[in-house]
Image: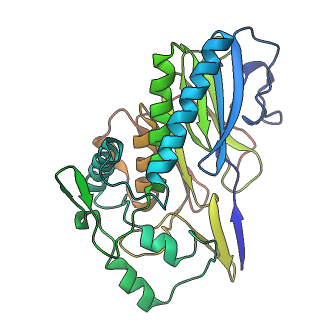
Amino acid sequence: MKAKRGPAPFSFFLPCLFSASTILSVLLFAACRPHSGWHEVSLLYFDTICDLKLYGQPEECRVATEKVREVFSRTEALFSPQASDLHSPEVLELYQTAKKVYLDSGGAFDITVGVLTDLWGFSSQTYRVPKPSELRQALMMVGLEKITEHQGELIIPAGVKLDWGGIAKGWGVDKAFSALQKQGIKSGFINAGGDLRCWGQNPERRAWRIGLKHPRQPGFLGVLELADTAVATSGDYQRYFEVDGVRYHHIFDPKTGFPAQGKQSVTVIGPEAAICDALATAIFVLDDATPLLRLYPDYGAIVVNSEGALSFVGKTFPFSLIADSR
């Protein structure tokens, strides 16, 4: 058995350097030439690299970066697997968002899959395929309807375990974006390990160019050109292990208890990173995402199925396929 953790699903490109063979990683923040007023920093949160590219005065950007640190630290404290706070306003707020997507998706997105995350070994990195009897028992603890809210606190039954991984990082990106706007940062880019938000213009005074990683090959599938938008991807290449040539990834179908089948990756684009995050997970699980995205008309998805075929669902955004991708 071998376990793998894939690279982040996005990079951004500066226009004068982009080509199918010349791609810059967001981790490097390389530039075509020096751009006065742009400041870059990489932070370590959510067990990944979080990159900021901000436009403003040096002191203004320094203070803004500290605000982002505060937001990300708070997000980790509230929504890590060890978190026990069930009554803070932030937890209740994100729970309501998660509940809405749960109901809208017919249960395809469900934050109560924590028991499955544990059972398959993704929490402890002791990966294994559970026995059918173990899955049946675990599925009895899955279902957001088991959670109730009473006097401003979530009531979690014994045996039910929350896994905020499909929405919390996007929520943190949204909160960081709000904090940066309050600090007067008019243009910028946040990439928290694949959950990202961009606003204003890039250093070339154009739309941001976001590269989508190919789920099976080195390099990139295509490029989005975006402004004032959030993006999130769910992929079977991000966290997975293999047994006898079968790939088992971390995106579970809450109804079967098994990793969802039929797709390699789902990228969702829209106004809020938290919603993009949750919708990407739901669409990965669903056979047909069209009814769900009718409820979210400002969001669109780029889906790569298990055969590698590309499709678009919901609202469309400027996207260029890299010619040599297959």
Instruction: Indicate the position of residue 129 as horizontal and vertical percent values.
Output: 56, 83
Instruction: Indicate the position of residue 140 as horizontal and vertical percent values.
Output: 31, 79
Instruction: Give the number of callouts.
Output: 0
Which residue lies at the image location 39% right of the left edge and 42% below the top edge?
Answer: 275
User: How is the rendered protein coloured?
Assistant: rainbow
Q: Is residue 242 left or right of residue 227?
A: right
Q: Is residue 293 left or right of residue 148?
A: right
Residue in front for this viewpoint, 151 or 46: 151
Considering the image in quadrants, where does the N terminus appear? bottom right
Residue in front for this viewpoint, 228 or 226: 228
Q: Is residue 262 left or right of residue 28?
A: left
- Above or below: residue 95 compared with residue 108: above
Instruction: Indicate the position of residue 273 as horizontal and vertical percent values.
Output: 46, 38
Which residue lies at the image location 48% right of the left edge and 39% below the top edge?
Answer: 172
- Above or below: residue 73 compared with residue 317: below
Instruction: Indicate the position of residue 204 as horizontal and vertical percent values.
Output: 69, 13
Q: Is residue 206 left or right of residue 156?
A: right
- Above or below: residue 167 compared with residue 251: above
Residue in front for this viewpoint, 244 or 146: 146
The quadrant holding residue 236 is bottom right
| Residue 206 seen | no
Q: Farthest residue in the left direction?
A: 151
| Residue 258 seen | yes
